[in-house]
Image (cartoon, rainbow, N blue to C red):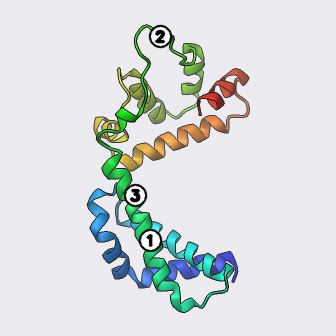
Amino acid sequence: MSPEHQWQKAISWVKSNRILVEQISAPYRRYMASNSKDIEQEAILAAFYVLDILADQAHDSSIFGAYFRVQFRTLCIKTAAGGMFGIVDDTEQIPSTPSGQRNDEPEHEILEQALEKMSKRQRQISRWILAQPTPVSITCTAKAFGITDRAVRILLSNAIRRLKNDHHGNQKLRKEFQVAA
């Protein structure tokens, strides 16, 4: 079965089994920074993954439902765990520079060049994060801007991708970014 066919089959299966998807995700929804559309997309990815595994290993498709439940529940748990455990105390996991020690942050000029490569909103959020005296969580950032955790993650991911893909930018900037990433 071609990947395109598997993808269409996964979409069709999830759309026809929405109640099952809702039942599997229900215990984890309050801990997930996801809306129903995000959960549906995760279910489609899980269904595609299971279809791909079953096709590769030439298994009978009658076991699809059981494999899907396990795979999708695992995705829900991972998403919920990121929401539950990563919100409150994630700043404790980020080491801070003790006072009096040398700070290895990039030069101000390099940082400004990197920020100029970002969109206005990405730059605004990045400047706010950098201005904080201590590391801040995604949730704290989201609350400060009145947006969802997922929106912050997407904005920052796109900003990082934009910096990584900047082939015409300053060589020193790209080198510093690669070291930091």
From the image, tell me which residue sits under label 1: 72
Residue depicted at x 54% and y 14%: 108
Give me the C-alpha separation between circle 3 and circle 2.
37 Å
Q: Which mark is residue 101?
A: 2
Give me the C-alpha separation between circle 1 and circle 2.
46 Å
Classify 38 as above or below 104: below
Q: Earlier in the sequence, mark 3 or mark 2?
A: 3
From the image, tell me which residue sits under label 3: 79
Q: Which kind of residue does numbered mark 2 sit on?
A: Gln
Q: Earlier in the sequence, mark 1 or mark 3?
A: 1
Q: Please, which residue is most extreme toward the top here?
A: 100
Give me the C-alpha separation between circle 1 and circle 3.
11 Å
Residue depicted at x 47% and y 42%: 155
Task: Return the residue nearer the eye: 132 or 86.
Answer: 86
Numbered disc 2: secondary structure: loop
Q: Which kind of residue does numbered mark 3 sit on?
A: Thr
Q: Earlier in the sequence, mark 1 or mark 2?
A: 1
Residue depicted at x 40% and y 83%: 17
The quadrant of the picture occupied by the N terminus is: bottom right
Q: Which mark is residue 168?
A: none
Q: Tell me where residue 70 appears, x and y as whole percent.
A: 44, 75
Residue depicted at x 52% and y 35%: 119
Q: Tell me where residue 86 appears, x and y as whole percent.
A: 36, 45
Numbered disc 3: secondary structure: helix
